[in-house]
Amino acid sequence: MRLIIIIACLATADAFVLSARTPLIIATKRTTSPHNTPLIILASTQDSHAHDEEWDTEAQMQMAKFSTLPRHESSDEVEVNQVLIKMEKAIQDLYMASANSSSSCKHTHEDWKVDNSYSLGSDSEKVFANTYVDLGKVDTVGFDYDYTLVTYTDELLDLIYDMALKRLVKDFIYPDEMLTSNMKFDPQFSVRGLAVDRENGWICHLSYTHSVAVAYEGRQKVSRERLMKEYSGKRALKPTERKKRLKPLNDLFSMAECCLIADVVQFFHDSNIPFCPKNAVVDILKAIGATHISGDFHRLVAENPEQYFEPRPYLKEVLQSLKDSGKRLLFVSNSPFWYVDAGMNYVIGEKWKDMWDACIVSAGKPRFYTESTRPFREVSQSTGRIKFKQVKTIEPGEVYSEGCLKELTKCLDWFSVPSSRKDEDEDELFTQGGSPVNPTVLYIGDSLFADLVDAKRDFGWTTAAVTPEVGWEFELAEKVQFDNAQTVIDLLLESLRTIQDKLGPGVRTEADIEVIDKLERLVSLWREEQNTLLGNPFGSVFRAKYQPSLFAHSLRRYCDLYMPNISALRHYSPQHRFYPQDARLLSHELQRGNLAEFDDIMERYE
């Protein structure tokens, strides 16, 4: 669909169509970006004289590579060169129209970076489906707390980073100079779904095949040659070695962890201090863990909710709508009661507990799903202390800690064993994957592996992930610059397929390989440009260079739904039925549509 839309735009923009002899200046404006990567700005020769002082001639020559396609040197490959000429014209025309219609030459890099504070109610506030889900058949909706019911400002990650850094210096005797070296959490560096290599301290972005697509040592990108050498020439590790070396950084809290690891490694390199990366990673992980366990940052957040919690104007409306439709509400959080109470009081009000049919804190997920003997303990709402009495039933409006899913099935009458299996052993039933657990539970959380994987895989619950990144990227994808970059990538990839078809099945000549290599380098340049627009060096959380990321693969595998925030549910009826946008997975299922769109482009430039 993307290419068809572009053709329609080009058809109405004849004034911007270039002839083969029209010179094109592709220039970059000198801008400041976190990664020193310039944004591509295109302007025609006629426009360039008005901006002589703003444009850098050297940059013009460098960035001309972005839209100049190679040519096959052999006179026998006329059809190959025809494809290249037509694609080059399509790319140039597209950007000429864009430059004139949006006055893009007046914008800086900062104008096009993703804005994480997208507006509520925008098109990016949608619920996306991986499978068919009928909310009308869901009778129980469960929620996580952190980054699900409540979301945090960037100041929370600043706080975690600063506390862990001070702990490194104080408790692990790291250099005092770290505290005066301007080391701060950088929200433009990391994304969710990365991994740290415990052996070398690299921050890695993994594809769905577990290949390392991109890696950073400190703040320096690791070269392809070093990647291949480190990972046995494959960019990947054997499964057993991968589990030992790579620690996933899957939740939003881990972005501070990721940034601190990179900054400590960079500090040692810049200061010429010999160090063992393996030991540094161990120390940093301990410092981050101690920061969480100590409760130090929890206390500061609870005392200053306006500073650390983002307002949630629609949260109460969403919960009340679900409640009014007859659904039970289940609250299951790993956070302690006093911390949860502070946040929920801020975003909903003091009577927040009245909305829940069951409220569980300090749950210890994923152990809440995997263990079978942890009992529940009732929490005093006035003092926060744990009561000593045995919990036999879960009552609405009360608060309980710890426990496990098996005990929950005993303490509630919501869950039932099918009548056909009532004679079977209870323990055997429970361990067979959720038979005694009502399958009409929808559980919503932000952490795939702490909140959702076991609930989905072992107990058959319907799961939904809160992924704010989809909202940010959805809005960015609608911006002209990002959409154009993706269109160019699509054109280049289809050109590569078509050219190889025309070259036939025989052995490739050096000239053949040279053309293919140059086109692949152009694809890489355009992907880097998209990463720049995303505002971080790793690119999209959902893609690892050319492939879906491991995070995206897990999201599709373990989550029936995903959404930018809980507030998105207010746009849907409690009986809404969600359908997957496109359940196709294999290339042959998508190829027919892509070829038709490419053929339309080729006909346009006959």
Image (spheres, rainbow, N blue to C red):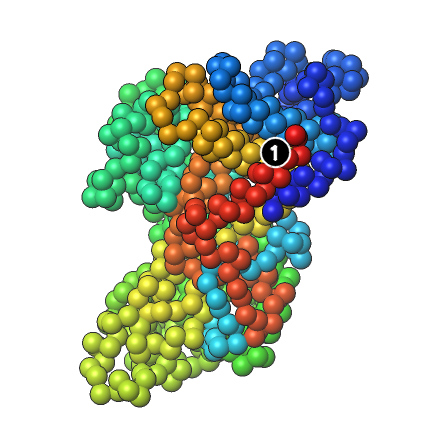
Which of the 4 quarters of the picture holds residue 575? bottom right
414 left or right, relative to 242: right
Q: Nearer the viewer, residue 107 or 592?
A: 592
User: x%, y% of residue 395?
Assistant: 42, 81
Q: Residue at x 52, y 72 (%)?
A: 135
Q: Residue at x 52, y 31 (%)?
A: 495
Residue found at the far top of this picture:
58
User: x%, y% of residue 431?
Assistant: 24, 71
Residue 287 visible (yes or no): no
517 left or right, relative to 84: left
Q: Nearer the viewer, residue 50 or 493?
A: 493
User: x%, y% of residue 419?
Assistant: 31, 88
Dot 1 lies on which element? helix
Residue 216 versus residue 445 in the image, above or below: above
Quadrant (top left/top right/bottom left/bottom right) for the C terminus? top right
What residue sits right under mark 1 in the picture? 602
Residue 157 versus residue 513 in the image, above or below: below
Q: Residue at x 69, y 29 (%)?
A: 93
Residue 205 visible (yes or no): yes
Which of the 4 quarters of the picture holds residue 210? top left
